[in-house]
Image (cartoon, rainbow, N blue to C red):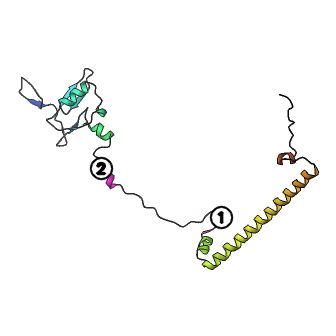
Amino acid sequence: MKIRSNFYTGVHHPISTRMRQDRLMIEICAFSGAKIYPGKGKIYVRVDNRSFRFVNGKAESLFLQRKNPRKISWTVLFRRMHKKGISEEVTKKRTRRTVKHQRAVVGASWEAIRAKRNQKPEVRAAARAAALRDGKEKKKAEDAKKKAEKAKSAANVARGQPKVSKQGAKGAKVAIANTSR
């Protein structure tokens, strides 16, 4: 502890100790961020009258060398930046539990969905079979229509009419083939 003494009166004043509401002040190191207890540490006062408190000579030396405390592994700033020593807080965090709610879908209300779910398997199977039959009938009708169109175009080609593309049938401009380059 550095002591400033008054030569004439013989009164000693410890530099780093301050009293506040009957308890001692704990300072923070300007470089490392460590706690400086009363009677420990150094004070460095710059020419511009700004004072810096250091926990030890090592912190003071590194500060005067203009080292970055965020790059020195033992400083509080480095440890905070790299999330060191905070494993206790991580375990306290709790994850939110998801609660499942049944909701309606855009096309159907919740009552309709529940009614379908509670249907007997035989009724469901019959509805599925009917839907499949309808689909097959529609497909057969489409296939028959396509066959009729193909037969019609084949008859046109046989009569001597040129084969026309879909765009040509709709009235698109016909490009004339170049005879020379």
Given residues 160 and 134, the one toward you in this image is 160
In which image quadrant can residue 125 be found? bottom right
Which residue is located at x 29 percent, y 43 percent?
Answer: 84
Is the residue marked by circle 1 packed among few (<14), some (14-19), or many (20+) residues within 10 Å?
Answer: few
Q: Main secondary structure of the magenta part?
A: loop
User: Considering the image in quadrants, where does the N terminus appear?
Assistant: top left
Q: In which quarter of the image is residue 54?
A: top left
Sequence-first tag of 1 and 2: 2
Residue 34 circle label: none
18, 53: nearer the viewer: 53
Looking at the image, residue 132 sits to the left or right of residue 79; the answer is right
Asked whether residue 100 is drawn in magenta, I would say yes
Q: Estimate the x, y position of residue 7 in percent, counting from the top left.
A: 7, 23
- Magenta span: 86-109
Secondary structure of the residue carrying tag 1 is: loop
Question: CA–CA distance between discs 1 and 2?
Answer: 49 Å
On the image, numbered disc 1 is attached to which residue? 107
Q: Where is residue 116 in the image (x, y as percent from the top left)?
A: 61, 73
Disc 2 target residue: 87
| Label 2: element kind | helix
* Location of residue 18 by image quarter: top left
